[in-house]
Image (cartoon, rainbow, N blue to C red):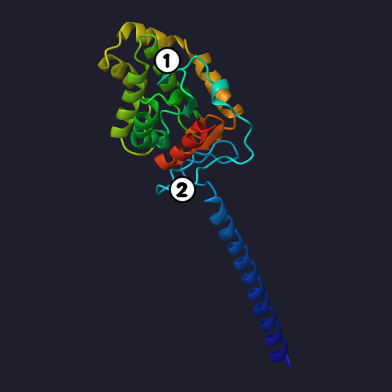
């Protein structure tokens, strides 16, 4: 008499487990589909949870569709140019702004792999004005603001781009991840590129360019930036360390407008 009841109970439990497994399988299938169509979920060591900042990983290959943010506000690079350092013809048809973080490994990847091609093909030929603005993600990159301020101090001595390149070069020597920050390194590097050490150190220690960097940060987020590097090319926003082909596609389209 007890056996049938026990068997019936086992059957019920077995059926419940089967149903639960089907539900779980269905959920994972839906998540898989979503992941495919959204290029992942944005999790990883370069992501900040809580819906704030996400560093977009570089896209592999050379013919990818540019990662244009959806729902982005209307932007115009020429209207977002402050008094920041730039490369190229100031009257070039297309203005390209990079909002960047010196401790961001993807920003370093763009500087190393893609910027030289953009510079050679579009900046040096007078087609694009390339502007650098700061987007320090201080919550995950504690050195990002001092690094940003240091380049402005170097600019006082007409060596912005030398300091810009020096920081990325030294960061690159330390590996592909987010490196540790040391203020003494900045002062050492400044001397190595020929800056007047006393003037540079006084500028950096005084926080002279704190507000300048904060203004860049504000403009980056208000124009739709959600991670670094973030670009505005003419009227087109572009996120992440995309391959050269992605930038080329957008620049060519902007040149035809």
Position above or below: 163 against 205 = below
Residue 133 appears left or right of 30: left
Name the foreground residue: 45 vs 58. 58
Residue 24 appears left or right of 12: left
Q: Determine the residue positioned at 32% across, 21% down.
A: 185
Name the foreground residue: 105 vs 83. 83
Name the foreground residue: 98 vs 249. 249
Q: Position of residue 152 (x, y in %)?
A: 42, 15
Gap in angstroms between the C-alphas marked 1 and 2: 34 Å
Name the foreground residue: 245 vs 44. 245
According to the picture, the residue beneath numbered tag 2 turns out to be 64
Q: Determine the residue positioned at 63% across, 66% down.
A: 26
According to the picture, the residue beneath numbered tag 1 turns out to be 152
Position above or below: 68 against 142 = below
Specify whether residue 80 is in view.
Answer: no
Q: Secondary structure at mark 2?
A: loop
Position above or below: 36 against 11 = above
Q: Position of residue 77 (x, y in %)?
A: 54, 25
Q: Determine the residue positioned at 31% across, 33% down.
A: 172
Quadrant, the N terminus: bottom right
Per the rendering, the mark at residue 234 is: none
Q: Determine the residue positioned at 34% across, 34% down.
A: 112
Q: Secondary structure at mark 1?
A: helix
For disc 2, the neighbor class at 10 Å (few under 14, some 14 to 19, many from 20) is some
Position above or below: 207 against 248 = above
Q: Earlier in the sequence, mark 1 or mark 2?
A: 2
Total label count? 2
């Amino acid at each position: 008499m007890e056996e049938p009841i026990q068997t019936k109970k086992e059957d019920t439990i077995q059926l419940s487990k089967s149903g639960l497994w089907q539900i779980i399988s269905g959920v994972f299938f839906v998540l898989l589909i979503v992941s495919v169509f959204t290029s992942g979920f944005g999790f990883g060591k370069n992501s900040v949870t809580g819906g704030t900042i996400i560093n977009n990983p570089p896209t592999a290959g050379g013919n990818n569709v540019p990662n244009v943010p959806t729902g982005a506000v209307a932007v115009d690079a020429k209207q977002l140019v402050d008094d920041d350092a730039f490369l190229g013809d100031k009257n070039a048809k297309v203005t390209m702004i990079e909002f960047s973080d010196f401790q961001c490994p993807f920003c370093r990847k763009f500087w190393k792999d893609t910027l030289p091609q953009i510079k050679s093909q579009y900046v040096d030929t007078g087609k694009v004005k390339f502007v650098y603005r700061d987007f320090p993600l201080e919550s995950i990159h504690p050195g990002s603001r001092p690094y940003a301020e240091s380049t402005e101090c170097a600019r006082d001595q007409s060596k912005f781009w030398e300091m810009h390149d020096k920081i990325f070069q030294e960061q690159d020597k330390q590996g592909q991840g987010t490196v540790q920050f040391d203020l003494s390194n900045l002062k050492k590097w400044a001397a190595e590129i020929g800056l007047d050490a006393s003037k540079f150190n006084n500028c950096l220690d005084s926080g002279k360019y704190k507000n300048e960097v904060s203004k860049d940060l504000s403009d980056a987020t208000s124009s739709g930036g959600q991670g670094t590097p973030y670009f505005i090319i003419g009227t087109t926003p572009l996120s992440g360390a995309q391959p050269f082909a992605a930038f080329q596609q957008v620049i060519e389209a902007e040149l035809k407008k």
